[in-house]
Image (cartoon, rainbow, N blue to C red):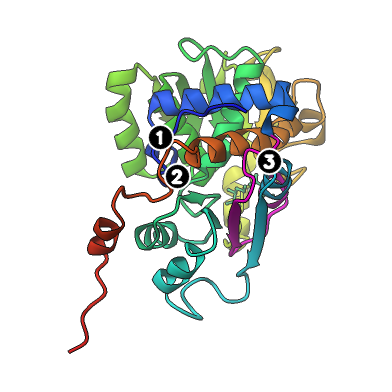
Amino acid sequence: MNSFQPIGSKDLLRLSDLAQHEILDILATAADFKRNPERVAGAMSGKSVCMLFEKPSLRTRMSFEVGVFRMGGQAIYLEHREAPLGTRETISDYGKNIERWCHAIVARVHSHSTVVDLAAATRIPVINTLCDMHHPCQALADLQTLIERGFDLNHSRLAWVGDGNNVCHSLIEAASILGFGITVVTPKGFEPDSTVVSQCVARSMRTGARIEVTNDIGAIQGAFAVYTDTWTSMGQTESNAKKSAFEAYRVDRKVMAIAGPTSLFMHCLPAHRGEEVTDEVIDSANSVVFDQAENRMHAQNALLCHLLSPKSSLSKSDDFNTAHARHPTPALQ
Ligand code: CP
Ligand code: NVA
């Protein structure tokens, strides 16, 4: 059995919750699991993961359920599309129940504040699997995919084309932590969140990352890979005005030609063929979209193993009482 370097049984609400060496450790384990699938057996024996979803999913649900099963653990899917968290009971009460049975919570929610509240209320790791602001598990799988294809964390550059929201934010954070280059190209008005960008730019002073945000599609020239995402994220209302703004940012053969003949095409999926990407690009030999999907499982298995390593305390706090003191139960008057 592998001995995983514990990362302190913390939460993963956004990629920047992880240090550079923690991300690199997780990626090394993920690559090892992919090469040697037998090594995951038993890694989560006797452990249960609660998976709560306020939004639909194919890849996240499947990759966690299959991944935890292969590690000998149990994943329990909780559907919250009809009644978002906090409506039947408080988020805090919900979390304090779950932690009595489960070893980790995987949460796909509308608002980032929901995972923040859940993490604050519980002593087990909370893993954000997509909110309005971040998608850190996607970024881990994308990093694994890029590295497999020869992406050089010191010299290569990733290009983002499309909406500057959740997946884009996690990739900018990845660049800023690991020190690689990222060019984010969006239509006017759809740039990434300015606070996320400024935090990443500040971090890049230490790591050497080159972060560029522009509306000019020509800026993708020479990028190692071109990454796009849906124009209408889950929970958003389709708008013709938004679609028109994105027309010039569809990733088609001409856009890929600007990047260069060896540039890879990436997409977190689900794809809306004919909108953000054409069939000929997503189905081309340069497309790695299904590798990204497969790597969700390897990267997440690695993440769970590091978070739940026997050497790391199950509690996010070393001291049960300290944990409770942070969220004291008021005494009855
Ligand atoms: N990329 C991704 O998170 O896919 P799902 O929405 O299908 O989970
Ligand atoms: N931006 C997309 C990502 C889906 C994985 C969304 O939020 O729907």
Q: Is residue 78 left or right of residue 98?
A: right
Relative depth, front residue between 124 and 79: 124
Location of residue 120 with respect to 305 vertically, above or below: below
- The CA distance from mark 3 to mark 2 is 20 Å
Labelled pair 2, 1 in contact (Cβ < 8 Å): yes
Q: Which residue is mark 1?
A: 18
Q: Which mark is residue 241?
A: none
Sequence-wise, which precedes: disc 2 or disc 1? 2
In the picture as drawn, the residue positioned furthest to the bottom comes out as: 333
> Which residue type carries mark 2?
Leu
Q: Residue at x 73, y 41 (%)?
A: 70
Q: Helix or strand or loop: what does disc 3 sit on?
A: loop
Q: Is residue 317 left or right of residue 248?
A: left
Which stretch did the figure color magenta? 41-63
Location of mark 2 (residue):
12
User: Of the residues shown, which amino acid type is indicated by label 3?
Assistant: Met
Instruction: Please state the horizontal and vertical placement of residue 162, each as a whole percent of the image.
Output: 57, 39
Can the viewer see residue 214? no
Give residue 119's quadrant in the image: bottom left
The mark that comes first in sequence, 3 or 1, is: 1
The disc label shown at residue 71, or none:
3
